[in-house]
Image (cartoon, rainbow, N blue to C red):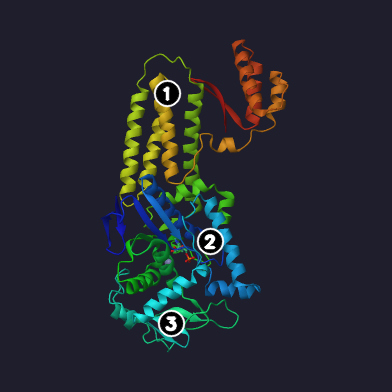
Amino acid sequence: MRLYNTLTRRKEEFVPREEGKISFYICGPTVYNHIHIGNARTFLSFDVIRRYLEFSGYEVTFVQNITDVDDKIINRANEEGRSASAVAQEYADAFIEVMRALGVKDPTIRPRATEEIPAMIELINCLVEGGHAYEVEGDVYFSVRSFPDYGRLSGRDIEQMQSGARVEIDQRKHDPLDFALWKAAKPGEPSWSSPWSQGRPGWHIECSAMSGRYLGSPFDIHAGGDDLVFPHHENERAQSEACHHTTFAQYWLHGGMLTIDREKMSKSEGNFLLLKDVLEHVRPQALRLLMLQTHYRSPFDYSVERLAEAAAALDRIEGATRNLSWFLETAASDTASAGVGGAALLAQITATRAQFSASMDDDFNAAGAVAAVFELVTAGNASVAGGITDEEHKQAITEALATIIELLSVLGVAIGTEGADAAEPLPAGLVPLAAALANYAGDIPAEAVDLLLEARACARAQKDWALADAVRDGLAQLGFTIEDTASGTRVVRK
Ligand code: AMP
Ligand code: ZN
């Protein structure tokens, strides 16, 4: 498996520190608002990567924090006249709910900043004692120049940064590049006692403390959107390595930004779509398929047209799984004549699995993996076009169906063999139709369909075209067409 490491700027062979195990940290949201689909893209990309690592046999400890104390949360709380913790609680709950709705797996551990203050104080202490941080009037700052490797992750030269730094309003810092580890609280702000002041932690120190506490040092993979490389990840790395004198994260993975009209989607720009709103009219599988089409490191320009294409692709997959299941259910058990369908389909299954893994092993090329599944979808449909020929063919179709479902689930796209049609109940209007045309006396729409198809078959056998047409037209009015196939007759939604 090869993955692109931001730290070295190249694709590297992935070797976890402990065989079979992976420690994985991803920066979580700051909970002052609902997340937008840009945030969702990053979380989804790394959910797919985590799922694939698990599918590949690794035991993954996946840690994602929640930033529940921050200026933005405090500002929102003040605007709304409630406490910062009430604001954070509301949006943390909403975040967890909408992640689950999108099919993102829960992390193994989900620490919250406000519950991890002792670990942060300990880390800041370590930095102060080691000469990497200093206190000024209750605030504590990291001394950037005390960490000679500063700038390596983001590829920045410290001297250039220095000359580009704006004149600092805050004269208390020894150097304009220094950043806050601890901030003395203003009246009314949430605060904790510390050796320096009643105050609260800076943002960067949170992730250093939480990743260190739950994953140790070093750990394997650190992930986030590429907008976090500087300053957030550069600072996390400096803090942790300055204290622990060891590598912080072995591999740094960064996801590209979701854009809209080529502009980064962001709360401050106001060009955002909330994930919860999008999921009100789009199935999560369609949104996932859409995002999987673009490599996770590349920018991705969102549009409703592309979303509609992804929804259509999902329909195609579900149509195929329904189709294959239907042929399997109706296949006669005594299928005799020897066919070649089975062998060809088995070969495609092998090819699809190989292409799926090769794509994902190459820096998580999910688009290649999806394309491999589509080849199997096409081959499966083609294979049953003439009905099921023999037992081997039937087994191959069973396996093709299972493979499509399994590989898509590795990408977090849940497909049932029933698909969307099954989720949507059959219309009640089928019952009176069957009562009128097929003497149906019950009240179950699924039974009504079967009887209507039987009645049509009898009518055709007896050349009663009027009745056969009445069944067809009645079903059409309810949104169905009748399909005569090699294995029998069925209704499908138009
Ligand atoms: P934030 O709550 O702003 O810290 O963002 C949470 C996560 O979403 C971080 O990993 C960011 O990198 C990521 N993120 C923010 N905006 C976008 C965007 N437009 N596209 C992709 N990821 C984003
Ligand atoms: Zn972080």
How crowded is the residue under tag 3: few (<14 C-alpha within 10 Å), some, or many (20+)? many
Q: Nearer the viewer, mark 3 or mark 2?
A: 3
Label 2 CB less than 8 angstroms from ligand 1: yes
Image point 43% across, 42% down: which residue?
408
Image point 43% across, 21% down: which residue?
388
* Callout 3 amino acid: Val
Residue 178 sits in quarter? bottom left
Instruction: Describe the element under mark 3 as helix, strand or loop.
Output: strand
Q: Nearer the viewer, mark 3 or mark 1?
A: 3
Percent x, y for residue 372? Answer: 36, 40
Report, in whole angstroms, how far the alpha carbon at label 3 lies from the one at label 1: 69 Å
* Callout 1 amino acid: Lys
Q: Nearer the viewer, residue 67 or 37?
A: 67
N-terminal of the pair, mark 3 or mark 1, is 3
The answer to whether mark 2 and mark 1 are in CB contact below 8 A is: no
Vertical position of residue 406 compared to residue 468: above or below:
below
Q: Is residue 99 left or right of residue 395?
A: right
N-terminal of the pair, mark 2 or mark 1, is 2
How crowded is the residue under tag 2: few (<14 C-alpha within 10 Å), some, or many (20+)? many
Residue 177 visible to the viewer? no
* Callout 2 amino acid: Ile
Q: Which residue is label 2 attached to?
A: 35
Report, in whole angstroms, how far the alpha carbon at label 3 lies from the one at label 2: 31 Å
Percent x, y for residue 255? Answer: 39, 59
Residue 130 visible to the viewer? yes
Percent x, y for residue 348? Answer: 34, 32
Q: Which residue is label 1 attached to?
A: 394
Instruction: Describe the element under mark 1 as helix, strand or loop.
Output: helix
Q: Which residue is label 3 attached to?
A: 140
